[in-house]
Amino acid sequence: MMGVFRVSGFGFRGLPQPRQPETRNQESETQDRNPEARNQKPGARDQKPETRNAIRVLAGFLLVAAVAAAREPDGTFSIIRTPNNGIPVIVLPGDTFEATLTQQAALSLVAENASPGLTVEWTKLPGGATKAHCTVAADAQPGTYAIEAKTEDRTDRIPRSVFVVASFPDTYIVAQLTDTHVGGDRNGRSASDIFRDAIKAVNESQAAFAVITGDLTHDGDLTQFQQFLDILDTAFIPTFVCAGNHDRQGLNYERVFGPTVYMFRFSRDGYLCFDTKDFIPADELSGQDTELEIFRRAIKPSRWSVGVTHRYEPFMAMRGQLVLFVDDPLDYLIFGHWHRANTDKEKAVPWGRTPITVTPATVDGYIRLFDVSGKGVKGREPQKVAATE
C-alpha cells in the first residue's frame, strides 16, 4: 500500500447545530482528575537528517510567500474549507489529495518562485459544496505551499495547507502542544507570547508534524482564533488541531478549521483526531460516534493507530469509548486538558489496553515530543520551552 499522507473525512455535510460552550475555569479543570496504513510507497526511503534539514530550510523559505492568507476578515473560511493550516495534507510528488470548497474555482498551489502543476477533478457534494480531487505534478518541488482558489470576483488563499515531501520516514518524531489558551493570559506573560515560544521550540526540533490538542483559545471568540492563526503560521511543519471545551463559542471553531472529526496517515501510521465536546456521560446525537467508527476502521491496517483529542475521562459517552477502546482498541491515545502529565497510576484507559499520554498545558510553557518507530509510540518527558512570567 502507498505511503501517501492524506487527510480524510472532508465530506461537507453542513454545519451542526450550535452547542452551548463549556465555561469551566482552570481550577475546575485541574481538579477533574485525582493526581493519585498505509505502508510506505515502494522505493520510499527514510529521510536522512540532511534531507530533513533541507526540507525545513526550503519550507521556511517557501513560507514567506504563503503567509498572506485570504480567508474572511474575521479569520473564517471564504471559498476553501479543507485543506487548511489546521488540517493540512502532506503528499509526495505525483500523489493526490482532496479539497473541499464552497464552490468550484481555479485551484493552484502557491509559494515563492514555485507553483507546481495541479490536476483537478470535481465532485458535487450535498448542500452545494464541491470536492476537488487534486493530483500534484510529478516534478513538484518539496516544500510548503498555500492552496489558492480563484473565481471571477475573489481569490482565497490558505497558507501552510499543502506540504510536498520527497519521501516518508519509517521512524520520526511528533510534537504535541495543548491548551494554548490564546487570549486568556493566565500567567504573567501573555498566552500568545508563550505559544509563539512553543512554536519556535517545535521549529527547532526534528518533529515531522505537530498536533495541537484543544483549548486553542481561551474564550472561543473569533478575535482569539485570529491571534491563534497568526502564531500558528510561524510553524515550519504541518500542524493538526482539534477543538477543546474553551473553543466552544457557537460554531466558531468549525468556521475557522472545519471538521471536528478527521483522520490522516503518515508513513505507515494512522491518526484519528476527534472532539470530545461537552463533558457529558450520555451518548450524543450529532453523528460523531458513527464517524469515529468509520475512521477507526479506515486506519486499522496501519502499523500504529493513534487517537488525538483534547480530553478523555472514563465516564464520557459510552458508544465512542466502545468503538475506540473495546471493540477495536486504539494503540495509543494522546490528549491534554488536565494541565499536568498523567501519573504512573494513569497509564491506560481503565477498561482497555490503550495506553494514554497526557501533556501539561502549553500556556504553562510545555510541549512533548513522541518518538514513533516499529517499536511503538513513546512519549518523552514534557519539556518546559517557554517562560510564563
Image: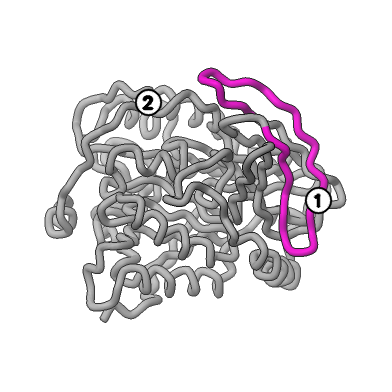
Residue span colored magenta: 105-131
The residue at which mark 1 appears reads as 116
| Quarter of the rendering occupied by the N terminus | top right
Quadrant of the image containing the C terminus: bottom left
What is the number of the mark on residue 38? none
List the residue tagged with mark 2.
289
Q: Looking at this view, is 245 or 51 the one in front?
A: 245
Circle 2 or circle 1, nearest the eye: 1
Three-letter code, disc 2: Asp
Q: Is residue 190 above or below residue 333?
A: below
Hey, what amino acid is under mark 1?
A: Pro
Q: Which residue corresponds to the image point at 49% horizontal and 36% vertical from the top-left?
A: 262
Residue 337 percent location from the top left of the image: 27, 53
Judge whether 59 appears above or below 260 on screen: below
Q: Quadrant of residue 338?
A: bottom left
Element type at marker 2?
Answer: helix
Image coords of residue 222 (percent x, y): 35, 51
- Residue 170 sits in which quadrant? bottom right
Nearer to the camera, 140 or 266: 140
Residue 306 visible in the current orientation: yes
Mark 2 nearby-residue class (10 Å; few <14, some 14–19, many ≥20): many
Mark 2 or mark 1, which has the lower sequence index?
1
Residue at 17% in and 47% down? 23
